[in-house]
Image (cartoon, rainbow, N blue to C red):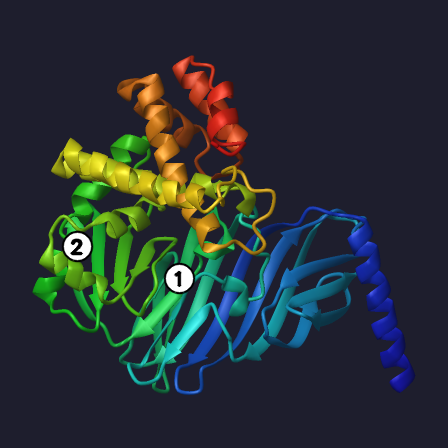
């Protein structure tokens, strides 16, 4: 047994070296996840079935695994696996087809990506999906997603996709959600806890608002702009909102968009209650349901296509709702952030060479310099032409992954304006 184990490790090491020498594109078709989170122990056990395509010549496939422990891997064309340094490397046998399906059983105590609070009795995901689910975390790899969550009875569950069923058994409830369109793994997520809930309708669309610390009436005030925002983004994008529900949850200390819902910092609700125009973060996360979740940057190098668009759209909504002066105040605040970055000598192109370890200034560039550049584009080609071009770009690339040149070409095709010099000056190199 010891000899076999050593040979297996050596062989997998050789496979790893070979895989590094030959880059084969991985295309995940679907994830089917079963997960049981334990809030008190900050522990999860789960199983994910991954259907994917990869070149028939590839002798291995790699998925990100955080610090999770792998119990077993089963499925087609499987020889062995090795889990090390946050990467699960699976050795594949020779095969006739590109498509393969594997099931991975795992457990662990996530150090990020899934946050537990045993005092407030809730858990929610944020940012790093591979910390709680074995997956390919490239934003350009879009896949179908199904999640089955087993949680204690009496708790509320919100997750990516459409709720398909609730099964009650032995003091637990299994919630099943299914997402019938492809999206990147960073948009997958869930939240569980004892939440108060408010609901309203926009046509057939159910708008759901959740929190622990706010009453029904307060939730309705905090999120009262949501129906108008959705109508505004539908008009600006040319795309009707795509799911039967949109949920917003006031929880923890983070903000993030997921497929079909968003989380917002719990204390943010107080700001909105004090100032009804303080809605930028609500509109920003909602805008991602179009720009980010459905039109997605192919790699993090082009992250500005997600974040600058959502930041700019929050200002554009303010212009629509509260007037041009508020819009210009927003744009000026974005510009001031950018000026500070330039003053510190940290200006960079919006298309990054690498996004492996971004600084605070790097992140602010893609949000605020990017939003300011979109404002300059609007001024350059004119208001009506700009919004026609944004609709053209969004419709053309809806449910696709894009790079910056896709954005530029779409704007040029719609507007008839040559934008090569503009993009070279503002997007591909430092302004200074």
Residue 264 - label: none
**Residue nearest the observer in this picture, 193 or 30:** 193
Instruction: Name the residue beneath numbered marker 2.
Output: 223
Tell me which corner region of the image, top left, top right, bottom left or bottom right, holds residue 79: bottom right
* Residue that lies at the very extreme toward the left in this rendered image: 217
Residue 408, horizontal then vertical, whole percent? 48, 25
Tell me which corner region of the image, top left, top right, bottom left or bottom right, holds residue 321: top left
Residue 371 in view, yes or no: yes
Give above or below for 64 relative to 315: below
Q: Quadrant of the N terminus?
A: bottom right
Q: Residue at x 19, y 35 (%)?
A: 319
**Mark 2 closeness class: few <14, some 14–19, many ≥20 residues within 10 Å:** many
Q: Residue at x 34, y 86 (%)?
A: 171
Give above or below for 233 relative to 17: above
Give above or below for 30 relative to 412: below
Residue 177 - label: 1
| 338 left or right of 139 in image | left
As helix, strand or loop, the secondary structure at mark 2 comes to loop
**Residue nearest the observer in this picture, 295 or 264:** 264
**Residue nearest the observer in this picture, 83 or 99:** 83
Residue 432, horizontal then vertical, whole percent? 48, 32
* Residue that lies at the very extreme toward the top in this rendered image: 416
């Amino acid at each position: 047994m010891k000899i076999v184990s050593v040979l297996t490790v050596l062989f997998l090491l050789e496979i790893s070296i070979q895989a590094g020498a030959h880059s084969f594109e991985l295309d995940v078709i679907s994830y089917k996840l079963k997960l049981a989170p334990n809030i008190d122990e900050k522990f999860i056990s789960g199983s994910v079935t991954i259907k994917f395509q990869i070149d028939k010549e590839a002798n291995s496939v790699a998925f990100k695994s955080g610090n999770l422990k792998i119990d077993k891997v089963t499925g087609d064309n499987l020889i062995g696996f090795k889990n090390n340094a946050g990467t699960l490397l699976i050795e594949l046998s020779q095969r006739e087809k590109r498509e393969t399906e594997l099931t991975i059983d795992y457990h662990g105590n996530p150090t990020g990506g899934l946050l537990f609070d045993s005092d407030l009795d809730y858990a929610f995901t944020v940012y790093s999906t591979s910390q709680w689910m074995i997956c390919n975390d490239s934003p350009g790899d879009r896949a179908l997603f199904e999640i089955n969550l087993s949680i204690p009875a009496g708790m509320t569950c919100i997750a990516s996709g459409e709720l398909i069923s609730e099964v009650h058994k032995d003091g637990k409830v299994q919630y099943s959600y299914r997402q019938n369109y492809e999206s990147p793994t960073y948009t997958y997520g869930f939240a569980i806890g004892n939440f108060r809930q408010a609901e309203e309708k926009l046509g057939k669309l159910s708008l759901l608002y959740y929190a622990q610390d706010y009453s029904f009436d307060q939730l309705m005030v905090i999120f009262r702009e949501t129906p108008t925002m959705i109508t505004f983004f539908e008009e600006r994008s040319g795309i009707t909102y795509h799911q039967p529900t949109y949920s917003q949850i006031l929880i923890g200390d983070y903000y993030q968009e997921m497929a079909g819902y968003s989380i917002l910092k719990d204390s943010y609700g107080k700001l909105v209650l004090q100032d009804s125009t303080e809605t930028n973060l609500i509109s920003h996360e909602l805008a991602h349901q179009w720009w980010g979740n459905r039109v997605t940057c192919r790699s993090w190098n082009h992250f500005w296509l997600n974040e600058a668009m959502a930041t700019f759209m929050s200002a554009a909504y303010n212009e629509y709702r509260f007037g041009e002066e508020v819009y210009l105040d927003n744009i000026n605040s974005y510009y001031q952030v950018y000026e500070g970055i330039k003053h510190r000598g940290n200006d960079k192109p919006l298309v990054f060479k690498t996004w492996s370890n971004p600084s605070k200034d790097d992140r602010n560039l893609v949000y605020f310099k990017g939003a300011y550049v979109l404002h300059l584009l609007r001024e350059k080609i004119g208001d009506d032409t700009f919004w026609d071009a944004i609709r053209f770009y969004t419709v053309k690339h809806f449910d696709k992954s894009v790079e910056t040149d896709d954005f530029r070409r779409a704007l040029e095709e719609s507007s008839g304006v040559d934008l090569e010099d503009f993009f070279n000056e503002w997007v591909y190199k430092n302004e200074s």
